[in-house]
Structure formats: structure tokens, C-alpha cells
Image (cartoon, rainbow, N blue to C red):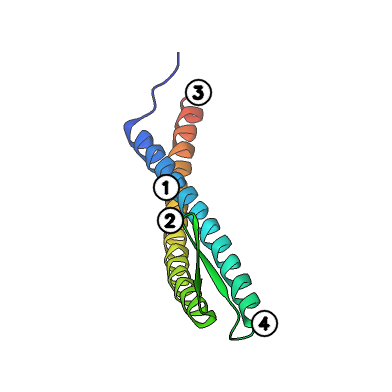
């Protein structure tokens, strides 16, 4: 006969699943931000080698809009700064969630081992 999962264990398992989902979401968001940062750094590197009077275009929807090299660099650097701050925040969130995940996993393991000990002692 199959035993039901005790409510305490079920609660911890649900919490574990929620934390894992949050961690996956944060890791995916970090990957997107890191990719955008690589693209920005590449664009800044290309702009650095261009003369100051060179025409630069920015994509805005379906249009290309001409802007100065200085404005392009300014916009890219501002976006880069925002993304770096967001990435740092996500790093902190990831660390905190990993810590919580480890704690909940330890509780689940402890509960399961105590159930196992009770079962083997009762046999």
C-alpha cells in the first residue's frame, strides 16, 4: 500500500520546486542581459574606431535614425550601466535563492532520512 506524503514534506517539496523555478528564471534573465552586454560592448568597440564625424544610425522600430557618434556612445554607455546594475541585482538574487534552495533541500533530505530510519527501525 502506498503511503501518502506527509504535509510537512509536501510543503517543503513545493517550496523546493518554487525556488528552482525562480532560480531558472533568474539564470535565463541573466543570460539575456549578458548577451545584450556583449552586443553593447561590441558596438562600443566598433564606434571607438570610427572617426568623430562618421554617420551612425540607430534602429527605432522599422526605421534607421541618424545620430552622432557621441550620442550613440552615450546611449550605449547608459544602457550598459543599467544592465550592469540589473545583472548585479540578479547575481544577488541568485545567491540568495541558491542559499534558500540548499536549506530547503537539506530539510527535505533530513526528513526523508528520518522517515527511512523510522521505517527500517520498525521492520
Circle 2 or circle 4, nearest the eye: 4
Circle 1 or circle 3, nearest the eye: 1
- Binning the other alpha carbons within 10 Å of mark 2 as few (below 14), some (14 to 19) or many (20 upward) gives some
Residue underneath mark 1: 19
Q: Nearer the viewer, residue 77 or 108?
A: 77
The residues tagged by marks 2 and 4 sit, at their Cα atoms, a distance apart of 42 Å
Q: Relative to 17, does residue 62 appear above or below in the rendering?
A: below
* Circle on res. 97: 2
Q: Earlier in the sequence, mark 4 or mark 3?
A: 4
Q: Earlier in the sequence, mark 2 or mark 3?
A: 2
The residues tagged by marks 1 and 2 sit, at their Cα atoms, a distance apart of 7 Å
Circle 4 — which element?
loop
The residues tagged by marks 4 and 3 sit, at their Cα atoms, a distance apart of 77 Å
In the rendered image, residue 16, in percent from the top left (x then y), is placed at 42, 43
Q: Decide: marks 4, 3 in contact (CB < 8 A)?
A: no
- Binning the other alpha carbons within 10 Å of mark 1 as few (below 14), some (14 to 19) or many (20 upward) gives some
Q: Nearer the viewer, residue 8 or 113?
A: 8
Q: Decide: marks 4, 1 in contact (CB < 8 A)?
A: no
In the rendered image, residue 83, in percent from the top left (x then y), is placed at 46, 68
Q: Quadrant of residue 38?
A: bottom right
Q: Decide: marks 1, 2 in contact (CB < 8 A)?
A: yes
Decide if residue 42 is on the left or right side of residue 83. Answer: right
The residues tagged by marks 1 and 3 sit, at their Cα atoms, a distance apart of 35 Å
Residue underneath mark 4: 49
* Circle on res. 123: 3
Circle 2 or circle 3, nearest the eye: 2
Residue at x-position 44% and y-position 33%: 115
Q: Decide: marks 1, 3 in contact (CB < 8 A)?
A: no
In the rendered image, residue 34, in percent from the top left (x then y), is placed at 56, 63
Q: Nearer the viewer, residue 32 or 46?
A: 46
The residues tagged by marks 2 and 3 sit, at their Cα atoms, a distance apart of 39 Å
- Binning the other alpha carbons within 10 Å of mark 4 as few (below 14), some (14 to 19) or many (20 upward) gives few
Amino acid at each position: 500500500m502506498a503511503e501518502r506524503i506527509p504535509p510537512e514534506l509536501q510543503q517543503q517539496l513545493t517550496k523546493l520546486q518554487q525556488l528552482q523555478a525562480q532560480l531558472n528564471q533568474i539564470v535565463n534573465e541573466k543570460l539575456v542581459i549578458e548577451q545584450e552586454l556583449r552586443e553593447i560592448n561590441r558596438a562600443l568597440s566598433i564606434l571607438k574606431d570610427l572617426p568623430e564625424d562618421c554617420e551612425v544610425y540607430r534602429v527605432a522600430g522599422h526605421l534607421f535614425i541618424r545620430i552622432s557618434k557621441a550620442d550613440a556612445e552615450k546611449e550605449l554607455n547608459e544602457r550598459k550601466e543599467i544592465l550592469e546594475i540589473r545583472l548585479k541585482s540578479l547575481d544577488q538574487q541568485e545567491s540568495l535563492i541558491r542559499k534558500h534552495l540548499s536549506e530547503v533541500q537539506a530539510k527535505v533530505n533530513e526528513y526523508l532520512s528520518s522517515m527511512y530510519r523510522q521505517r527500517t527501525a520498525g521492520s
